[in-house]
Image (tube, coloured by chain):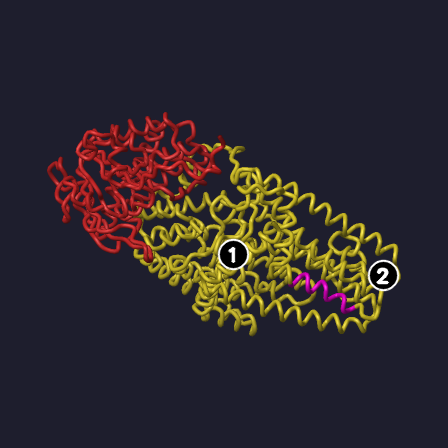
Chain colours: A yellow, B red
Amino acid sequence: MVAHLLSLRFRLLVNGFKRSTWQLVGAIIGLVYGLGLLAAIFAGMVGLSFAEPIWGRTVAVLAGALAVLGWLVVPLLLRGFDQSVSVAKLRSFPLPPQKLLVALLVVGLLGVPGLVTLLAALSTTLSWIGEPVAFLTAPFAAVLGALTCVTAARALESVGASLASGRRYREVMGVVVFVPVLLLGPLVAVVGSSVASIGDDLPSIAAVVSWTPLGAAWSIPGDLALGLGLEALAKTGIALATLGVLLLLWRRALAVSLVAAPTSSGGSSASKGLGPFARFPGTPTGAVAARTAVYWLRDPRYGGSLVALPVLVVVGAFLAATGSDWFLVTLGPLFGAVLGITLCAEISYDGTAFAAHLSTGVSGVADRAGRVVTLALFAVPVVVLATVVPLVLLDRAGDVPALLGVALGLLLTGFGVSSIASTRFLMPVPAAGESPFKTPAGSTFKSQLGMYVAWAIVFALSVPEIALGVAGVVTGQLWLGLASLVVGIALGSVLLVVGVRRGGASLDRRGPELLAALRNAQGS
Amino acid sequence: MTDAAADPVVPAPGGAPGPTTPSGAPALQITGLRKAFGQKLAVDDLHLTVPTGSFYGLVGPNGAGKTTTLSMATGLLRPDAGTITVLGTDVWRDTVRAKSLVGVLSDGVALFDRLTGEQLVTYHGLLNGIDRETVAQRTGDLLDLLDLRGAAGTLVVDYSAGMTKKIALACALVHAPRLLVLDEPFESVDPISAANIRDILAGYVSGGGTVIVSSHSMDLVQRMCDHVAVVAAGRVLAAGTTDEVRRGSTLEDRFVELVGGRQHNEGPSWLRTS
């Protein structure tokens, strides 16, 4: 059965290529990237074999721990993660969970990310050429580590998926995603004060990490090379226990998801009244705005699309702590660029429910404007905060007008551009009711490309305020900053209106074709 | 198929008026409708006239083009050729006006199911451009009519299949359409809800409205509809009043006779347990 599932997986991959050349292009780019990465890692490992064993262990443990973390986190952040053989699709076959688990493990390990991880892990063997004992144990430790990576990812995903089938969990998720945003201020302060000198402490950090489930497996050959036999034994125990616990968790979640209904209802709280529908104006535009507001609050996919924002804050804070604060300074404009483009996915999130807009004959402009209004109510304050707070904390309040101009310009221009863009192409998104982090069906390189093109257009249209803003920050001239603010808001507003009008006209024209595409997306 | 084309109850190409045409334009008139998906011809030169005030059943095997036809008639899918008028208004020329005359319940289309039932009906009403007070009053009336008052504050995603069909029907009715187009309104609906929906539709027709339903249930169509059209392979095989089409036998037997493809075998031997 393992072989059978594996051949199914590759069959799906090949058929995907047949369906779209863009997917093939994406895969080839991914392959070249992976091979380049591997070549670099191999070269690095050979070089490392000439260094002290302590460095070999440090690199293996830290890189390995990062790999495990990556396998845990990346599927949550990135939607393009391979999931062609998913448990939900296999549910109807009489497969014992035990066998399915082995099969899925092999399938996961032999995917592109799995193979790259496995080969990179095996390459650590090269760094122990001079140490016979470590050289012989390294391949086993590497396989153990790679298995931990795949198992951890699959276990988390299974546990998450079986939890996510309860609607309450999903609603909570929507809120949880926003928590890091609220912690923005404290986070900056804490990270800024604690991480001062990190370079020399790497070996001792590695030593600590090697005792955790993240790093134990990767540290075994290094410990042997350093003559710490007992430590190596203990860490083998930790690594095996980690793998065992993960497998157990995965098996239990798998057994649950093999029998559970795809969507279990219940635990629903009846709400009274019309909510946002009573507060927004009673017009088609107001209705669309109210409906989108309900969805921002209730549909975790909307909140999930903002997961990049807290990541930006953390990266900015980290870079600021290590001495370069440029990232934190540009946080507002980055937020503006990210939030402005969010609207690109809105019609895709609607799915075939978009038929309601089509069958009622609501005008495209009302549709576009309603969606912009709701996002703006939330995005404008967030962008203003993300611009002002870091600058005040960094004691650079003088740069606020310049950067606020750039940030608001990007946000408003983004609204305009994505109002048009979302009527031209559909984003691959998880279907309504699925986990916000579930991989969408048929994610193609082409629609990703469409989003990057939209982004490029946003930046191109925002060149005036960006130029003025940069000039203002560099020269420190207040009037340049104020000019950036005025131009950003004025030009952005004009482009927003143009975008809503033209997007609305495009929606009126292309509505039936969009619905047909949405039906196809649902069917695949 | 050629037998069926010679059938006297098939309307002549060009759309001869239906048998019981009242004064004024028919509720729905389809002429020369054509739609292809890639190589596959889903609707092939289809003609259909639905008289105003009729309760019209549309029956046909899977893949006959029923949903495709109804989607095109309600402005959801662009036809390759042909014209469709609703009460004299061309659906694809004067789209907004035509849509204001039609209420739609689509099959295989999601609802905005994160809204509560009350919010969803309100949403459809407001999208149609009706003012808030009227929408609130009609929403209340419809929730009472469909016995959904108790579930008004529950999210539609937590509704049962029957309740979902009923709330979708409420959404289709909220703007007081003259023509109601319902694609598979009885699928996965329990018998009691189905009977209630049937009563509401009969009341709507007796009040001067026109209803078109597509269904797989021949019994239901025979009992409920005064007109029926049999569709297969994208064409109308027979159309007219229910009595004209079934010609004394049951609608189901007549349907099988028209469409063909009934097989008489008992399946492979390994499927038999005794």
Can residue A170 be seen at all in this image of the molecule? Answer: no
Report whether B258 appears left or right of A15: left
Q: Which residue is mark 2?
A: A224
Using the image as rendered, state which of residue B237 and residue A481 is in the foreground: B237
Can residue A228 be seen at all in this image of the molecule? Answer: yes
Determine if the magenta segment contains residue A172: no
Q: Position of residue A274 (x, y in %)?
A: 42, 36
Q: Position of residue A60 (x, y in %)?
A: 75, 63
* Secondary structure found at label 2: helix
Quadrant position of residue B25: top left
Report whether B120 appears left or right of B103: right
| Numbered badge on residue A415 | none
Q: Position of residue B101 (x, y in %)?
A: 23, 42
Query: Which mark is nearer the camera, 2 or 1?
Result: 1
- How many numbered circles are shown? 2
Count residues near mark 2 (Cα–Cα under 10 Å), then give few for <14, some for 14-19, many for 20+.
many
Quadrant position of residue B23: top left
Q: Which residue is mark 1?
A: A12
The chain carrying label 1 is: A
Determine if the magenta segment contains residue A121: yes
Using the image as rendered, state which of residue B44 and residue A178 is in the foreground: B44
Using the image as rendered, state which of residue A297 and residue A441 is in the foreground: A441
